[in-house]
Image (cartoon, rainbow, N blue to C red):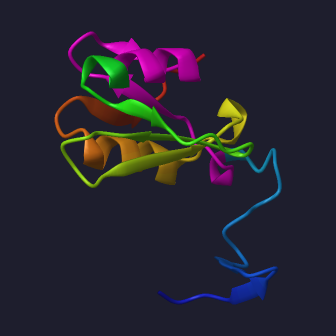
Amino acid sequence: MSGVWVFEDGIVRRADSDPPSGAGAGGSRPNKVLVHVPSGEVVTSYDVLERRLRELGWERYLYDPCLLQFHQRSTVHLITVPRDFARLKLVHMYDVVVKTRNVFEVRDAAPA
């Protein structure tokens, strides 16, 4: 992957991956939403996400003050999302999609 990479406080990140908030289409969540496909419900909070994941056998994993984590006993998969729903980014949405095949999708948000 090309670009400028920065190592700070034990974390490596792309220097150009965190545009300032309000950066329009380049913001942290560029008009994308996580959708529960069977019901068509848009995930608007962690209550909705947790309810849908529990229906699939996912359980809350270890308490962490910064993260929410879910796991399935039958797999080694772990879904990790920031505790603050406003910080949910596209990479977190795709993490949910990949680990729950055919149950969630990332879609373009409906125009306001």
In the depicted structure, whether residue 72 falls above or below residue 16? above
Q: Is residue 47 magenta?
A: yes
Write down the quadrant of residue 55 in the picture: top left
**Of residues 49 and 108, which is closer to you in this image?**
49
**Of residues 37 and 67, which is closer to you in this image?**
67
**Of residues 70 and 13, which is closer to you in this image?**
70
Residue at image location 56% in from the left, 23% down from the top: 46
Q: Is residue 42 magenta?
A: yes
In the depicted structure, whether residue 21 falls above or below residue 10? above
Task: Residue 104: give x, y in percent of width and height.
Answer: 29, 31
Left or right, 41 with reference to 99:
right
Left or right, 19 with reference to 74:
right
Q: Where does the magenta region start and end?
A: 25-52
Task: Residue 108: give x, y in percent of width and height.
Answer: 43, 33
Residue at image location 31% in from the left, 34% down from the top: 105
In the depicted structure, whether residue 71 falls above or below residue 110? below
Write down the quadrant of residue 96 in the picture: top left
Write down the quadrant of residue 31 in the picture: top right
Task: Residue 52: give x, y in percent of width and height.
Answer: 35, 18
**Of residues 10 and 76, which is closer to you in this image?**
76
Q: Quadrant of the C terminus?
A: top right
Residue at image location 50% in from the left, 48% down from the top: 80
Left or right, 35 with reference to 100:
right
Task: Residue 83: give x, y in percent of width and height.
Answer: 67, 37
